[in-house]
Amino acid sequence: MNYSRQREEVMDQLKLHHDHPTADIIFAELRERDPNISLATVYRNLKLLSEHGAIKKLTFVSGADHFDPNTELHYHFVCNECGRVFDVPMKVAEHLDQDAEAFVPGEVTGHELVFYGVCDECARKS
Amino acid sequence: MNYSRQREEVMDQLKLHHDHPTADIIFAELRERDPNISLATVYRNLKLLSEHGAIKKLTFVSGADHFDPNTELHYHFVCNECGRVFDVPMKVAEHLDQDAEAFVPGEVTGHELVFYGVCDECARKS
DNA sequence: ATGAAATTAATAATTATTATTAATTTAATG
DNA sequence: CATTAAATTAATAATAATTATTAATTTCAT
Ligand SMILES: [Mn+2]
Ligand SMILES: [Mn+2]
Ligand SMILES: [Zn+2]
Ligand SMILES: [Zn+2]
């Protein structure tokens, strides 16, 4: 993987976020500093970076994928109203993979845990 | 929600599955018995049925949504090679929602837990 | 400096899903 | 049973998210 200015920009911009942005958000932000960068370039580099394990792709029940610069195993909370994605800094249940292994026709290498609910802000509105 | 023959067919066909099919698989199967059923009808009814809680929509890291006639809370194992989705009949960790609540800016109403790995069949092939 | 391989911007294509619409079906009511 | 308004359908168009194509540019080992 050669160096590219655009890839570095994508990585740097994502690292500024703690709110798990989508590709189009990163694109919109980069466009302000680099008005020639292409949306396909943002998608391609987010894909490459996640395939190389430099970032993490997060897929939830609907809409576009989200991206996380934090590749440590940790959990997320998704608001069913506004769709925002929050980190859940609780202790990771490492034992889960072993627990599951006994019930699975294969080898378990990891897990993802997502909590759903309504965030305080949305609860206040209704 | 009025009765419709097509909706009943979608529900019945999904209930025959233990392998979490996608909309296009249900469509292909129904077409054999009912050659006039439309793909949009399958999508619309899967959406309606899951909104009414009669079935469960499952979204994983890539590709199309999967559907599950079992609405009880339970976990899944996805093979990273073939993409197949297996049930994981381990005990459900009900306490997780309460554990998470302390770390979350909102109210947690549920969670989804997905295990990833390689199924035995795919492991044998490589 | 040279040149092969990698990357880009622009755009086309693809995939999964939802929306539109005119025709048909359902089900409540007289 | 006949009437009729609302729900549903098949067919198809449209949309949203993402990936592929391509010609031009950039990177980087030699
Ligand atoms: Mn995170
Ligand atoms: Mn299941
Ligand atoms: Zn919210
Ligand atoms: Zn497999």
Image (spheres, coloured by chain):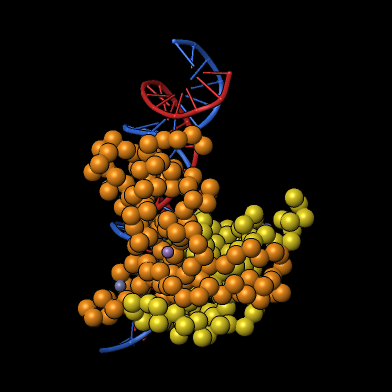
Chain colours: A orange, B yellow, C blue, D red
Q: Position of residue B106 (x, y in %)?
A: 34, 79
Please report the residue visible at 42 percent of the width from the left and 58 percent of the height from the top. A68
Q: Position of residue A22 (x, y in %)?
A: 36, 55
Task: Please name whichever residue, B113 or B48, is drawn nearer the observer in this view of the structure.
Answer: B113
Q: Is residue B2 left or right of residue B121?
A: left
Q: Position of residue A100 (x, y in %)?
A: 65, 74
Q: Is residue A108 left or right of residue A24?
A: right
Quadrant of the frame with the C terminus of chain A? bottom left
Q: Position of residue B126 (x, y in %)?
A: 75, 50
Whether B13 is drawn above or below A39: the answer is below
Asked whether the viewer can see residue B58, the reply is: no
Q: Quadrant of ligand 1?
A: bottom left
Please report the residue visible at 59 percent of the width from the left and 67 percent of the height from the top. B115
Q: Is residue A4 left or right of residue B13?
A: left
Please report the residue visible at 26 percent of the width from the left and 76 percent of the height from the top. A121
Whether A87 is drawn above or below A39: the answer is below
Please report the residue visible at 70 percent of the width from the left and 61 percent of the height from the top. B119
- Residue A108 is drawn in which quadrant? bottom right
Task: Please name whichever residue, A97 or B124, is drawn nearer the observer in this view of the structure.
Answer: A97
- Number of marks in picture: 0
Asked whether the viewer can see residue A21, the reply is: yes
